[in-house]
Image (spheres, rainbow, N blue to C red):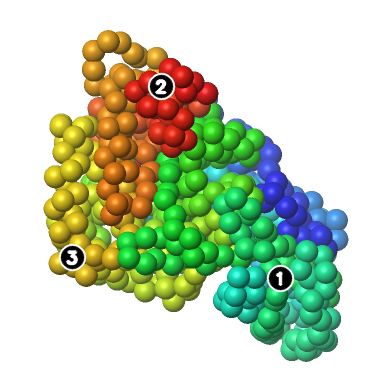
Amino acid sequence: MIRTFQQHRLRKSSLLNGLWDFVFDKNNVGLTEAWHTRFPSDFDQVPVPACWNNELGKFEYEGVAWYRTRINCEEAGHLRLLFHAVLGHADVYWDGEHLGYHFGGYTPFDFTIPNVTAGEHEIIVRTDSTLGRNTIPTHAVDWFHYGGIIRPVELQRLDDVSIARMRITYDMTGDSSADVRIALTLWSMSDASTEVPVSLYRDGELFYSEVVHVPACETVELNVGQVWTNVKRWEPENPALFLIGAVAGNDDMIDRIGFRTVETRNKKILLNGKELYLQGVNRHEEHPEWGFAFPNKLMTKDLDIILQMGCNTIRGSHYPQSEYWLDLLDERGVLFWSEIPIWGACLPAEDTDDPLFVQRALTMMDEMIERDLHHPSILFWSVHNEIDTRSKQAYDLSFKLTELVRGKDQSRLVAYATMHPMEDICFGLFDVIGINYYGGWYYGHADFDVMLETFHERCKEYGAENTPVLMTEFGGAGVYGDSGWEPRLFSEDYQADLISKALKLFRSDSKISGTYVWQFADTRADLQSRRAYFRDRARSFNNKGLVNEYRKPKLAYRVVKGIYTRQSDPYNWGSTLY
Ligand code: ADA
């Protein structure tokens, strides 16, 4: 399942998941040797979706790899080939013809192949997981450099006229009334003009119908506006959701929305007019066995563990996470911070305005919003993490990204996470400021109060005195199972004590609207025998998880749970065992 609900009832769709032929192209000769027409014979097979690094003998490979599968079309017709996510560069070939190229990693891309004949066809994908100075993320990033087709591949059969896009936006006009707008894009691949009956449904009930004239080989946009009364709002305690279905001739599309408002006032974040205090964690969608090809089954468990801890929010560090995950958050009323993988702690300011880097950033942001616009759980679009926001280059990039976001979606808050809270020059551009600060870890003693005092003063200078502030990262490493009587670095005790003190301080600061502990689970770090970065990551993991990589709780999990659920004094954690 890609979503928790069915997206098409009429459009035929099948998943091309399974074993695909696979070969590394270590010397990058595949293009010159035309592997897209003559796939090498010495291939082996890997599962799709998956990261190849999780297969035996492939752990450290970063570079070019080729995939192949064959499909059998029972009847002729138009097809849509949809990749839900491929890490890095992807070139896709259909029967030897180049369909197109995509750069990214966590957002979908697709190709339409008209008039496909019945019979066998070959799909070949050349991927390149190499990270460099102008890729996003860049080569210096604190997570493992996985490669592969990490999310499902879908093959859909399209009718002569199909639905290319459905966009639902609204303005709340009262507690339970909204002005709703539906924009439906119809696309014709037929040589003849047609009259297409279109119907729109809300939770299965028809609310609009019309016959639309679609000229041959053209695109038509149908815009429907309606006033809806008696709509229940989407709220954490009662996350009301509505399935919106569109049927156009023989094609259909179903998506889901929720009605809520999000705004800021005097440093506070308001959801449906009510002030929020955010209690959260950062979550990578990663697991040692699956890498980034995270299984749905584990998502429900991650969410259960996080909710049991008393969280009402999650930061999706540091890239667009699975649609299935977002559906779960919508259904359980959990607030989400979504971001693109610009991870800049080691990114020199002058690399930030490389034109290709900027272009890739804008495209990723655009693709993330396109995919996820309808999820009510998403409150924040975050444009970057820890770039050098003391620099003009970072200011310019932030300006471009915030403009793009506001141009596409005004129903959410534009955010970022700064690692320079005392020197940042970008505060004024954002609706929400996230601070990443590792007092008590990288900075020795836990000087959070000094940092916050300077930061709050600086916000005034930059016109951000009313901007809400979230602590988006803080914490320290604790190796699972390592405890003792002395507060040693890397022990569970040190980690728990540090987080507990930090949380207490942040919660007593009325200018802070919430916290995201770094991080939910230990994650595989970018530690490879040949690379110099992150050599301090014991066991090759970022050990700052509240649970280890297999989701077993550390002392810090219990301590945070005690604080977030206010069950007990966190220092008396023994009584709050889960
Ligand atoms: C950064 C970064 C995280 C992680 C963390 C750490 O702030 O945003 O991805 O690398 O530091 O553990 O050092």
**Mark 2 is on which residue type?**
Trp
Q: Nearer the viewer, residue 78 or 478?
A: 478
The mark lying in front, picked from 3 and 1, is 1
Report if the beta carbon of the residue with label 2 is closer than 8 angstroms to ligand 1: no
| Circles 3, 1 touching at the beta carbon (< 8 Å) | no
Q: Disc 2 to disc 3, how far (Cα)?
A: 39 Å
Question: Could you tell me residue 478's position as x and y percent?
Answer: 33, 23
Question: First in sequence: mark 2 or mark 3?
Answer: 3
**Mark 3 is on which residue type?**
Lys
Q: Which mark is residue 230?
A: 1
The mark lying in front, picked from 2 and 3, is 2
Which quarter of the frame holds ligand 1? top left
Question: Could you tell me residue 436's position as x and y percent?
Answer: 28, 46
Question: First in sequence: mark 1 or mark 2?
Answer: 1
Q: Is residue 326 above or below residue 557?
A: below
Q: Is residue 244 left or right of residue 49?
A: right
Q: Is residue 411 visible?
A: yes
Name the residue rendered at 63%, 79% in the picture: 179
Q: Nearer the viewer, residue 234 or 22?
A: 234
List the residue tagged with mark 3.
Answer: 460
Name the residue rendered at 23%, 46% in the picture: 346
Q: Disc 1 to disc 2, how far (Cα)?
A: 45 Å
Q: Disc 3 to disc 1, how far (Cα)?
A: 42 Å
Q: Is residue 36 visible?
A: no
Report if the beta carbon of the residue with label 1 is closer than 8 angstroms to ligand 1: no
| Circles 1, 2 touching at the beta carbon (< 8 Å) | no
List the residue tagged with mark 2.
Answer: 573
Name the residue rendered at 36%, 38% in the picture: 518
Label 1, secondary structure: give it: loop
Name the residue rendered at 33%, 71% in the picture: 400
Question: Could you tell me residue 524's position as x and y percent?
Answer: 40, 31
Label 3, secondary structure: give it: helix
